[in-house]
Image (cartoon, helix red, strand yellow):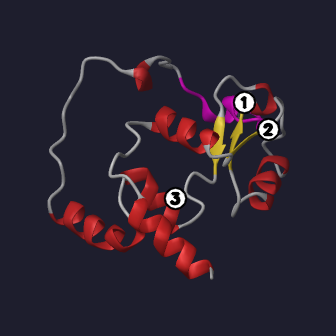
Amino acid sequence: MRMQNSARQNSAKSTNAPADLRAWLAYLAERGKLAIAREGIALIDELAAIAKRLERDSAVLFPRPDGHEIPVIANLFAGRDWVADSIGVTEDQLLPRFLAAASNPLPTREVPDGPVQEVVHDDVDLLRQLSGAEAQ
């Protein structure tokens, strides 16, 4: 019964892939597949335990883990069907699409700015920035 439902869902899928991570998270949220944790979840042990508990059911957004400004997202691709959805193909098209992409990679394109460059750190001390670690 589960295979029949899955096959029916695969044949009905659209080829429209989410454009970026924000769109993918919105897609998951619309389908009830995105859990949002409370702010301040501990980076050591707690975050991993929550992600593990939900790994097959939901992606998890951890806003301000341990009070840090940068959110953490876990379980973005809980199964092959999620990977296929993220690129807008059915599960049976996933491997051929991957092999084609690996054989014919897109050219890189340099851009002057972008969301990834919104926060830039010039003087980085990872030990000082990691929770619970001390600079030596």
Q: Is residue 122 above or below residue 83?
A: above
The crowding category of the residue bearing disc 1, from other C-alpha atoms within 10 Å (few below 14, some 14 to 19, many at least 20), is: some
What separation in Å lies between label 1 and label 2 (alpha carbons)? 7 Å
* Rendered image: mark on residue 82: 3
Q: Is residue 127 magenta?
A: yes
Residue at 48% of width from left, 35% of height from top?
23
Of badges 2 and 3, the one in the foreground is 3
- Point 69% across, 29% down: residue: 128
Look at the image and say whether residue 2 sits in the magenta stretch: no
- Residue 118 lies, with reference to residue 26, above or below; the image says above
- Determine crowd level at label 3: few under 14, some 14-19, many 20+ residues with C-alpha closer than 10 A: some
Element at label 2? loop
Image point (77%, 53%), residue name? 48
Identity of the residue drawn at 44% across and 51% down: 86
Q: Is residue 59 left or right of residue 53?
A: left
Q: Earlier in the sequence, mark 1 or mark 2?
A: 2
Residue 73 in the image: x percent, y percent? 63, 42
For marks 2 and 3, the one nearer the N-term is 2
Q: Is residue 72 left or right of residue 13?
A: right
Whole-percent x, y for residue 2 in the image: 62, 78
Q: Which mark is residue 63?
A: 1
| Prevalent SS, magenta region | loop
Q: Nearer the viewer, mark 1 or mark 3?
A: 3
**Quadrant housing the N terminus:** bottom right
Quadrant of the image occupied by residue 29: top right
- Amino acid type of disc 3? Trp
- Amino acid carrying label 1: it is Pro
The range drawn in magenta is 124-134
* Type of amino acid at the residue the image marks with label 2: Ala
Task: Choose the circle earlier in sequence order: 1 or 3.
Answer: 1
Say what secondary structure mark 3 lies in. Answer: helix
Question: Which label sits on residue 37?
Answer: 2
